[in-house]
Amino acid sequence: FFFQTRLSGIFYSKCSLKVTLILELKPSFVGHLCVNSISSSPVLRVLLSSPHHRPKPSSPSDEHSDTSMSSAHGHFPTQCGHTHLPSSPLAVPSPCLTTHLEHTALRHTASALAAARFPQFTLCVAARSRRVHTWQKFDGGFGVAKGVPGEEEAPAAGEAAAATVTQLDAKEVEAQLNAEASCVGICKYVTSKLRETMGGREFVAWAPESLRESRLKALAKLEMGQMPGASIVVVGNTGAGKSTLLNALIGEANLLPTNGMRACTASIIELRYDQSAEPAPLYSGEVEFISREEWEHELTNLIGDLTQQDGRAILNVSDPDAHNHESWCKLYAVYGDNYTHSTLAGGMRNGRREYLNMMADDLMKKLKNCRSITGKCGTIEHVADNDPGTFRRKLERYMDSSNDVASGQFWPLVKKVSVKSRKWSVLKSGAVFVDAPGVNDSNTTRDKVVKGYLKNADSIWIVSNINRAVNDKTAKDMLDHNFRRQLLMDGTYGSLVFIATQSDVLQRSEAITSLRLSPTATLEECAQKRCEFTESRIKKDYIDGLVEMGRASGDDVDRQDLEKRFELPVFCVSSFEYQILDGIRKVDGDAETWKNVEGTQIPALRKHVHRATLAQRARNVRRCTEQLLQFAQSIKAFTSLERDPDEKIHEKARQAFEKAFAPLPKKAQVQLEKFDKILADEFKSKILPQLDSGAETAALKCMEQAQKWSGKWSRKNIGAQPGLHWSTYKAHCRRNGQWKINMNEALAAPILTAVSTNWEKVFVRILSEQLGMLMLDVEKEFREMQDMLLPQLVSAGLDESRLTMIRGPIDQALKTRAEAAVDAAKEAVQNKQRELSRSIAPEIKNAMEPGYSEAFAEYGTGSHGRRVAILENHLEGASSQMFQAAVKPVKNALEPLRCELRDVVSTVAIASTLEDVKTNYSILWQKTTESAVSARKRMQPNLVLAIGETKTALRRLLLAQGASHQEAAAAMQYEGERSGDDDEIEIHDVTDEMERKAKEALRRNAVDLTAGDDEVEMGPTAAATRTSPVAVKKEKV
């Protein structure tokens, strides 16, 4: 590959030596490329071995060892100075596998490994003669012990294979990621090889131009894209310990800001694994700021919150419980004294000059010209460092929001912060942590981003203090009722994870009393029992929440069915003591409650992250590889079948095929229409009636809801009473009903409550079941067509084995495409239905905007009463039509949604398979020229190589994912394929040939021990190959 120029001196000047290239992939992947006589052999033999042991030079006693490499047992070549790998329970659970790659394949593999997952790697070359042992050093390679006869120095620690990974879950992750990276690299090579073969000038005559183009387009669709990750959104109340939890998971002490006295996270923080290699900084981040237009809109709202009845600005809000304290904090953080000192000199009073606050409009004009901080709007700030403490200090002003606000801060302007590091192994499998500050953020831009993350999240973690989780708050109440209902409709209610933090904080005496434990129970035993109680309590409350939503929708609820369908993972963690036990925190003393890291449950949570992410990746890579294999097999089947010279047979075959194939598209369409009708009936019976009834209920209850907002407000019972403070009410009108609460969502709640459970039932459960049945029916139609066609073609004079070669790839491809079609259809529908279910509240907002605007315009004495009356009168007048109008777009969108779903299934599974059937069977009657026959014959080696490499990659991938050897073999062999068919390339190992010749030379030079007088030296390899005592002459081999 790209190192070959540097290595050419060894290849050609010492071609008689055995040269081993060791490709080191940090942290644990080691690939051994054993090369012999590279100048004459176009093939490299690659041995992928256990990634958990680094190679070591053999002892001097092995100086003359000539033992051949045994790839079947996974041994390293001892003559290159490597010992055999000991067996290990932590090693990859499969024997070493071999594959044969051309130079270009190896180059693609190395490039893919570097780009996709393992950018840090070095190349080491070990070259050694039979008498003088020398480790040749290249960039990043082994240590050097040059020209010392009979001695050999081991590679320096840290320079050879990567450091041993101590955790089993990390080893499992490495094994699968290594297999994926290798698979992706080989698939990219195979794709390029197939493209070169089907479109190259040398083979241009193999098929008509139209057929070539269609096959090349089909191949282009099989290109592997970026591996899917998993977005994990972490939500929780202030002080729940989200930042400390994330610090523990990524293995940092306090990279994310934490404080024992106050809330710290004010920005959206995205954490991901960094693919960059050294010398790139260990930590890097991007801070994205909102645009100037977005900030000016936010500034208008903030100043509006800080405007007195007389129109003058409020310049100081010292009460942290005040409704506009947060707005004041933001303005002071950005503008500092430029804001708080915005006064104008007035008249004299009692002999002293009186200063008045600026009018709000004048303050707005002044602040727009203060750009020392707001000059960052619309930009992206880059931050990087190798030291975590320094990196944190650079980020703090973008991420930290304290109760003691300082000026000159950027956090009110930040849309999100993206941070990455190659140190964070928990994210290496592709997970992305999103630390969300909470929904209904007063910064509307940031609030929109948070809701977007939640809508598209693969998993949502609810974080709560363990005492709060089991006492005054439960899993049923931890999330807002509207939010939980939305999760159910999105089909993501089952992706929730509950994390109870601070499991180490408890009083032993209180735990013994409340949990009825033995007086002799230790603190750790008390903590463990409390964790068990918490887990069972939260899981019960989780199901109670589902039961409650079902009954609110008028459904008959089956609790046992809900418990089977929905399982809530619960983790009771101690982030703080995990950091102590793991050596991350070194200045906070010893852990008091937990004696090992497993008790803190952080390792279990890390495993959960890997399992969830790798499951998605495994499915994606496996399917892409299977589709590529099936494509290569179909092209090989097409090009390897010779056309029968009998024209009568051709005509009979064509007529038989056309007769059998003609009704197939219509039959497939009938199955598709049957599926569409079932879905339409489900919409009509379960969705539409609930939308109508929900709209009627919303119209009846809307005034009751509005009167709650205008109810009596009391500072002594903030949160206990439903009424809003007059200025908070006004702030909601200014923002069209969206601020501390979302009035529009509250008005839409009866509609969503009525439809939520049926919505989930149709779009998640029924849709999945019907898609699976549809694809089974379509498969059955294709199978029956070919079953009927086969005897007709055989009776026409065609060989049955040739027909099996045509049919096998089609059957396999149909199964894979059916699976892909189901997933594509689900993805299309889920994205669309999530948008539809969220469209009702915006429709209500549009209808309420005139009322909000008119109510906000009121000012002066008694303005609050007039404002309430205006808004309630508008709501009462609009309610008769507003709610029915809000559900109408949803009802109208259901039919286009069905059409889109039908098109996805038809395109992904049915149309492409119909095309394959016509193409593959057409070889039986197409007129073939001599040039086409010649081109197809020349294509065979490339196609065989492509199939062999793809099979090897798929086999390794399946084994890494936990499949047995039998399962892996069965997955790659279609019905009728002969075991040991010519898909595999027969390559003679140059190593074995050289070993054989060397042994013959040793035998020829062997002498009887009793016959010679000269001192001789025993050769271990020679001794192993003779049954009688022999010695080896001391001479150059």
Image (cartoon, rainbow, N blue to C red):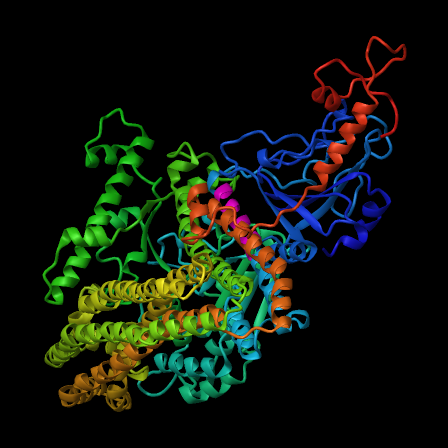
Which image quadrant is residue 48 in? top right
The residue furthest top is 1010
On screen, 137 above or below 476?
above
* Residue 680 located left or right of residue 72: left
Residue at figure coordinates x 90%, y 13% from the top left? 1014
Residue 438 visible to an observer of this rendering: no
Residue 597, quarter of picture: top left
- Asked if residue 173 lies in the magenta stretch, the reply is yes
Nearer-the-camera pick, 310 or 14: 14
- Against 78, is 329 above or below? below
Of residues 354 and 581, which is closer to you in this image? 581
Give the dominant element type of the magenta stretch: helix, strand or loop.
helix
Observer-nearest residue: 561 or 607? 561
Tally of numbered tags: 0
Residue at figure coordinates x 72%, y 19% from the top left: 1026
Residue 809's spot in the image, x, y percent? 45, 60
Give the residue drawn at x 55%, y 51%: 982
x then y, percent, for residue 331: 45, 75
Q: Report x, y in % for residue 65.
A: 74, 27
65 sits left or right of 985 in the view: right
Does residue 52 appear left or right of residue 450 in this picture? right
Rendered residue at 73%/19% (across/down): 1023
Q: Which residues are magenta?
A: 170-184
Give the vertical position of 40 relative to 233 (above or below). above
* Residue 81, placed above or below residue 176: above
Q: Is residue 792 magenta?
A: no
Query: Residue 24 location in percent, x, y?
Result: 66, 45
